[in-house]
Structure formats: C-alpha cells, structure tokens
Amino acid sequence: MSPKLGMETIRREQIIQSAKTCILTYGFDHFSIKDVARTADLSTGVIYHYFKNKNDLLVEVLKEAFAVSEKDVRSTVDAYDQPDEKFHAYLRTITSLPDYNQPFYTILLNYMAQSPYDDKINEVVGRFLRNLVLYLSTILEEAEQQHLLHHHSPSALAHLIINQATGTALNERYFSSAVVDANRRAFIQLFESMVATPASS
C-alpha cells in the first residue's frame, strides 16, 4: 500500500530517527530492521518501502546526522561578518558541540569503525570531513586576504583543526570532565592565535 500523500517525508524521518535510536542503544552491528520497526511502531514492510535494506537505511542515518551537525555549526558561525569573528566562533562552536549533541559523536564513532569495510559509508564520512575542511578553508582564506592569518596555508591549517577537533571530541568519552575542559581550552588557545583580530582604527 502506498503511503498517504504528504506522509513520505514524515515517515522517512521517523524511520531514520528510530534507526539512530537503535544505533545509540545497541551499537552499529547489533540491531535489525525489526528493531527499527518496533522502535518506530511501524511494520517492516513500511520500512522496506522507503529503504532497500539495512545498509541503505544506515547510510541515510549517517547523511542526516552529518547534515544536522553541519547546519548547527554554520548557523552559529555565519552570524558573524568578519573572518576573525567567524574563525573564533568556529573554534568555540566545535569544542562545545559534544555538550549538546553527544549522540552525533557516538554515531560518528560507530560509522568510522565501519568506514574501511563499506565503500558507501567511507564515501559519506569522507565527503563530510572534506566539506568541513572546505568551509573552514574559506574562512581562513578570507582572513589571509585581510592579512590576519598567521599560517602559511589556509587549507593545511583547516585540515589540522578538523583532525584535532574530531580526535578531541571522540576522546572525550574516555577522560574525566576536568581533562576534557583542559583539552578544550588548550585546543582553542592553540589555534585562535592563528588568526589575528584587526587593530582598532
């Protein structure tokens, strides 16, 4: 039976959110389409109407998680006009992101473990990381044009920051809150000096 008109988007989102709940509850490899159906209070037939198989659903969960996280960062950073303001807002935002979106990092950790074994997942993870680097590089290039960048390469610096931020966020689940706070402060202090604040005229 075809879904009611206008329900397609709602149903897809309902299934994706239920699959996300299953990943967070059971782990990547330890749930089935039946578990998703039970969590969503839908039949397995409805789920297979929207997704070919479990792997197809898992890829869509990953895409949605990345899109939400990227939107959160951009909406905060793009509120600023100047590249130094954007850059410093970016550093603050990505260090605080685990506080209000810890599930994202649990999902990311699950998927990164699968990335070497699944081409589609590897492609989505890689594209997400490249988009982060590209977005940050654009901010740093603008800073370079205004002679505010204290680094030889916007792209290289963007890669360093994304690599460090990703590793720091994933490691936070293994360390005490005091260590986490110290690492966040050190991260911001390490990189914020790379972009100067323009002198007042």
Image: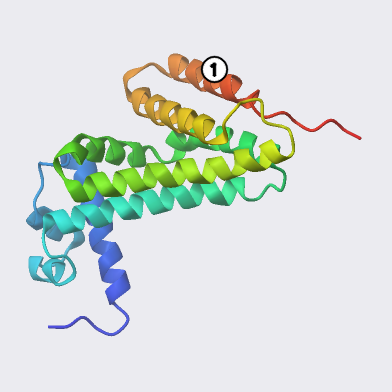
Q: Nearer the viewer, residue 80 or 19?
A: 80
Q: Nearer the viewer, residue 156 or 186?
A: 156
Position of 14 compared to 177: left or right? Answer: left
- View extreme (front): residue: 152
Q: Quadrant of residue 194?
A: top right
How is this picture coloured? rainbow
Q: Quadrant of residue 175?
A: top left
Residue marked by disc 1: 186
Q: Residues within 10 Å of mark 1 (few under 14, many from 20)?
A: few
Q: Residue at x 9, y 65 (%)?
A: 44
Position of 86 compared to 59: left or right? Answer: right
Is 201 situated above or below 120?
above
* Residue 39 in view, yes or no: no
Q: Position of residue 98 (x, y in %)?
A: 43, 34
Position of 46 compared to 94: left or right? Answer: left
Q: Residue at x 31, y 70 (%)?
A: 10
Is 106 situated above or below 15?
above
Q: Position of residue 101 (x, y in %)?
A: 41, 41
Q: Nearer the viewer, residue 52 or 155?
A: 155
* Residue 197 in view, yes or no: yes
Q: Residue at x 40, y 31 (%)?
A: 166
Q: Position of residue 188 (x, y in %)?
A: 57, 24
SS for dot 1: helix
| Count of numbered badges drawn on the protein | 1
The quarter of the picture where the N terminus appears is bottom left
The quarter of the picture where the C terminus appears is top right
- View extreme (right): residue: 201
Q: Amino acid at mark 1?
A: Ala
Q: Position of residue 123 (x, y in %)?
A: 27, 48
Q: Quadrant of residue 3?
A: bottom left
Q: Residue at x 18, y 47 (%)?
A: 119
